[in-house]
Image (tube, grey):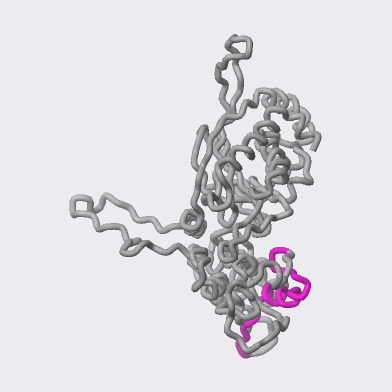
Amino acid sequence: MFEFKFADIGEGIHEGKLLEWLVKEGDTIENGDSLFLVETDKVNAEIPSPLAGKVVDLKGSVGDIIKVGDVVVVIDDSSSSSVLENETPPEASVEAQAEEKGAAVVGEITVSNDVIPSFHKQETATAHKEKKKVLATPVARKMAKDLGVDITLVAGSGTNGRVMKKDIQEVAGSKPQEAVASPVSPAGASHTAPALSRDFKGLVEEVELSPVRRSISNAMAVSKQNIPHAVMMDEFDVTDLVVFRKEAKVAAETKGIKLSYLPFVIKALSIALKEYPVFNSVYDKANEKVIYKKFYNVGIATDTDRGLLVPVIKGVDHLSILDIAENLNSLVTKARDHTISLEELGEGTFSVTNYGAIGSLFGTPIIKFPEVAILGIGKIIRKPVFADNGEVVARHFMPISLGIDHRIIDGADAGRFANRLKELLANPKLLLMS
């Protein structure tokens, strides 16, 4: 017998909600057949079987919360009469084998202790660093790099000693960057709602947060706690863009591509981010350094029935406007259909939120930590303005809100960045020359 445990599928996911059984007791399955569908705080995922056999027992019911390490399915693989366990999850085995090449479960990352010099002087008798294999989730590796923690010196608390986010946070917790780890309440503050008087008994409803909403809640708290936000607002005259997009929309439709205004904004960002690199950076608070990223991945805040997700379009500086539109449509559809992968939600360097899609004009967007800026765009409206000759003419305007990390970006920087975007969007043909 083989006890299949819910394994760590990456990105620090430690629990999920059992949405659907894809097998039933008595079914004969092959290696790789999907066993069940689970909802995590980031994605819905079908979990495959690591071996062939007969399903003997299903542990749990649809709607149950299962944690990493819980036995979910018992499989008779005819290998032995005794019970065996998947002590090393298939995902962990794949990751361990790929460690030396810098690969992870959801993609390839560079493994190096030299990315950011360590600010945490670990007490160790080892005078030199020895390379060793370390089981860790991709998000834990990234956090270790951002915080300057040597991951080979961290004791993992996950399955088979896998290093988790909380382990990295604990190592860095005594240093100035500790606020990154988790939101800390002000002294005396309480997270418990005050008790209602008897007059309101029976007139309230308690609803537990979904995994996605919990993730959003924590991310927003971390961002606001760590980043001193400042927001500048403006209106871009996009009259020529409206005309240009109307013409290009027809050509895009012949290729089966839906062309909104957002791909033009993303293309303009790909240009402006190169010219003003601080907007495509990360602030290393512990070492008081700015880490400039030479790749340009734009995340798009997407409204779904599970909450806000941020799929990421990778390498926007190498894509045409139609390429961006095609990628955008695909990712948004996946996010709303619950088929998006963890890889498609990670590695963003700058984010955009389009509250114009629901008819809003202005907002104060929250920066996606650890990024340092976010662009909010509102609904394009037609307004009367005075022309140079004194006549009143109708022009189209796009409201924008640019949120910045005021620790490393000043208002003047934001103004120059916004003016460059304004120039590019006011003259859309400039986007084609990039």
Residue 96 within the magenta-colored segment of the rendering: yes
Residue located 66% across and 66% down the image: 34
36 to the left or right of 90: left
The residue positioned farthest toward the left in the image shown: 198
424 to the left or right of 391: right
The residue positioned farthest toward the right in the image shown: 433
Quarter of the image where the N terminus is located: bottom right
Residue located 68% across and 45% down the image: 276
Task: Identify which residue, 224 or 260, lies in the foreground.
Answer: 224
Residue 85: x and y in percent read 62, 83
376 to the left or right of 246: left
Residue 348 within the magenta-colored segment of the rendering: no
Residue 309: x and y in percent read 57, 51
Q: Is residue 329 above or below residue 419?
A: below
Quarter of the image where the C terminus is located: top right
In the picture, residue 5 is in which quadrant?
Answer: bottom right
Which region shows up in magenta?
Answer: 82-107
Residue located 72% across and 70% down the image: 111
Q: Is residue 322 above or below residue 213?
A: above
Residue 114: x and y in percent read 71, 70
Can residue 52 be seen in the rendering of this structure? no
